Image (cartoon, helix red, strand yellow):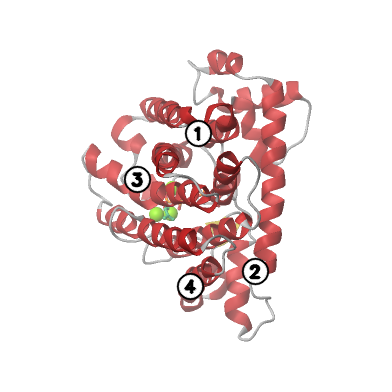
Amino acid sequence: MLRLVECWSGAEGSAASAFAKGIELRNDLLPHDVTHQFRRRCYTSFFMLKETLRQARIVIDETLERLLPPATQYPPSIHQAMRHSVFAGGKRLRPILCMEAGQMVEGCIPPGIEELGAALEMLHTYSLIHDDLPALDNDDLRRGFPTCHKAFGEATAILAGDALQTYAYEVLAKLQCPAEARVAIIGEIAHDTGTIDGMIGGQVMDLEAEHTRPDAQTLEYIHRSKTGALLTASVVTGGMYAGADLIQIQSLRDFGQNIGLAFQIVDDVLDVTQTSEQLGKTAGKDTATEKATYPLLFGIDASLKKADDLVAKASAALDGFGDSAATLREIAHFMVERKK
Ligand code: IPE
Ligand code: IPE
Ligand code: MG
Ligand code: MG
Ligand code: MG
């Protein structure tokens, strides 16, 4: 389980060294759990997942390259800013989840689903650009590079975020799936990035909860909304694209909601335990700005335990899919084991 941390870093090496490094890296975080986790997984799945993730990232990067206007497109400053943030890197987790959900439902990767994945990544990148603005989290570093407003100025960064959002919907409107599914996908994503239990609602409450010690219910609302909702949209719309029925969509929604919350809990933990170099974004920021986080309310160990429990629930939500859910389950584990 721990060895999966290698996947995001792109580091190569033998299975043994991957194991060893993973254990060394997370030993400080989960001393009580290491042996248990070591036994739980096998070498084969590690390399298979690593390869799946690598290939998916290539497909997504190529698709984003093809779909986004070139940097020279008039007016160039906005297109350069959009590309700066999109191609700074990133794990491409939302498109990967989307494509894997589609593959699980259809039995193969549905043709054209990578364009849905690319639109989700554009929306995610827009959310990061705005999250980093001085009026929100005021961050200088993102994906290992200066944030959009640091590189291009605040006005252009605001517009680059807006532009990635509107452009994502242009891509969604042209998806190569039946019109009924296309409309359902657009409605799902608009809702999940909106104000009612969606990303913007979560961001508003995240800002309003700074310097307070919110109750557990408010904290859960913030995390489910600001982060969980778009991750949920990623798997749900991947299923919709592949023609999932209502029961399958509900299973994907349960899965997404559980991994979505787990993912943000781990984001909070990494903010405390990792360095800025490892994260590619400013570490220790949540403490400095007195953000509402799981480690603040529950401590690191209890937060990681909660994330593990949520992954177990997410995994169970996919029981109806049988063995074809194996990769999504691996990705879910990976989402809480990551170190960046
Ligand atoms: C960071 O998301 C912001 C959150 C929602 C916690 P990711 O950790 O997926 O960021 P990238 O895309 O890999 O940069
Ligand atoms: C960001 O949450 C959530 C969204 C961008 C919607 P954070 O503020 O915790 O994300 P990081 O830590 O800056 O990546
Ligand atoms: Mg934030
Ligand atoms: Mg932030
Ligand atoms: Mg964070």
- The location of residue 297, given as percent across then percent down, is 29, 35
| Residue 70 percent across, percent down from the top left | 68, 75
Q: Quadrant of residue 142?
A: bottom right
Separation of residues labelled 4 and 1 (CA atoms): 31 Å
Which badge, 2 or 4, comes first in the chain's sequence?
Answer: 2
Pointer 3 or 4: first along the chain: 4
Q: Which residue is mark 3?
A: 224
* Gap in angstroms between the C-alphas marked 3 and 4: 24 Å
Residue named by callout 2: 67
Locate residue 301 relative to residue 321 in the image: left or right: left
Mark earlier in primary sequence (2, 3)? 2
Mark closest to the chain's N terminus, 4 or 1: 4
Residue 300 placement, left or right of 98: left
* Disc 4 Cβ-to-ligand 2 distance below 8 Å: no
Q: Which mark is residue 166?
A: 4
6 left or right, relative to 307: right
Estimate how packed mark 2 is, as few (under 14), some (14 to 19) or many (20 or more) residues with alpha carbons within 10 Å.
some
Q: Amino acid at mark 1?
A: Val
The amino acid type found where label 4 is placed reads Thr
Q: Amino acid at mark 3?
A: Arg
The answer to whether residue 162 shows anywhere in this view is yes
Q: What residue type is disc 2 on? A: Leu
Report which residue position mark 1 lands on. Answer: 336
On-image quarter of the C terminus: top right
Q: Residues within 10 Å of mark 1 (few under 14, many from 20)?
A: many
Contact between marks 1 and 2 (CB within 8 A): the answer is no
Which of 333 and 31 lies nearest the eye of the viewer? 333
Camera sees residue 291 = no
Dot in front, 4 or 1: 4
